[in-house]
Image: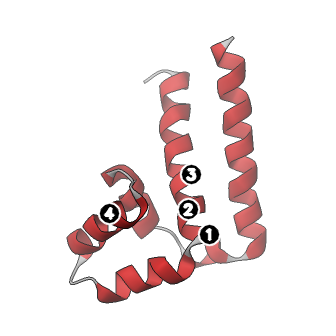
Amino acid sequence: MDEMSNLLVRRDIVRAYLLALDHTPELLAVCAASSGEEDARRRLRELFGISDVQANAILRLQVLRFMPDQIERVRSELDDITARLERLDR
């Protein structure tokens, strides 16, 4: 994969992280109501309109990511990725 492709994939994952971090109660409700990992993945895809890759990334989030300073780091990463993509697109 080239740099642009890697950044696009990473951007999708970081966007999914932020979606989950901004909707913690809904995320936890989906996980609590799911019968297993595949069911949780399916429910996350339906709830948030995301891909399997994004749903997997959300399911692998560490609890530490939900701390305010970590959420800010994820937002900063998205800003950095966006800026890098803009530079590559020129």
Residue drawn at point x = 36 percent, y = 88 percent: 32
Q: CA distance from mark 1 to mark 4?
A: 17 Å
Locate residue 73: give its quadrant: bottom right
Identify the element where label 2 is drawn.
Answer: helix
Q: CA distance from mark 2 to mark 1?
A: 5 Å
Residue drawn at point x = 67 percent, y = 37 percent: 81
In the visual, does 23 lie left or right of 75?
Answer: left
Q: Are marks 2 and 1 in contact (CB under 8 Å)?
A: yes
Q: Which residue is mark 4?
A: 46
Q: CA distance from mark 1 to mark 3?
A: 10 Å
For marks 1 and 3 on the same chain, the one whose residue lies earlier in the sequence = 3
Residue drawn at point x = 50 percent, y = 32 percent: 6
Specify the quadrant that holds the N terminus: top left
For marks 3 and 4 on the same chain, the one whose residue lies earlier in the sequence = 3
The residue carrying pointer 4 sits among few (fewer than 14), some (14 to 19) or many (20 or more) residues within 10 Å by Cα, namely few
The residue carrying pointer 2 sits among few (fewer than 14), some (14 to 19) or many (20 or more) residues within 10 Å by Cα, namely some
Q: What type is the residue that disc 3 sits on? A: Arg
Disc 4 versus disc 2: nearer the observer: 4
The residue positioned farthest toward the bottom in the image shown: 32
Q: Position of residue 16 (x, y in %)?
A: 51, 56
Q: Which residue is mark 1?
A: 22
Q: Position of residue 21 (x, y in %)?
A: 60, 69
For marks 1 and 4 on the same chain, the one whose residue lies earlier in the sequence = 1
Q: Which residue is mark 3?
A: 15
The residue carrying pointer 3 sits among few (fewer than 14), some (14 to 19) or many (20 or more) residues within 10 Å by Cα, namely some
Q: What type is the residue that disc 1 sits on? A: Asp
Q: Position of residue 14 (x, y in %)?
A: 57, 51
Residue drawn at point x = 46 percent, y = 77 percent: 27
Identify the element where label 4 is drawn.
Answer: helix
Identify the element where label 1 is drawn.
Answer: helix
Q: Using the image, tell me which numbered label, if any, was put on residue 19.
A: 2
- Residue 82's place in the image compared with 21, above or below, is above
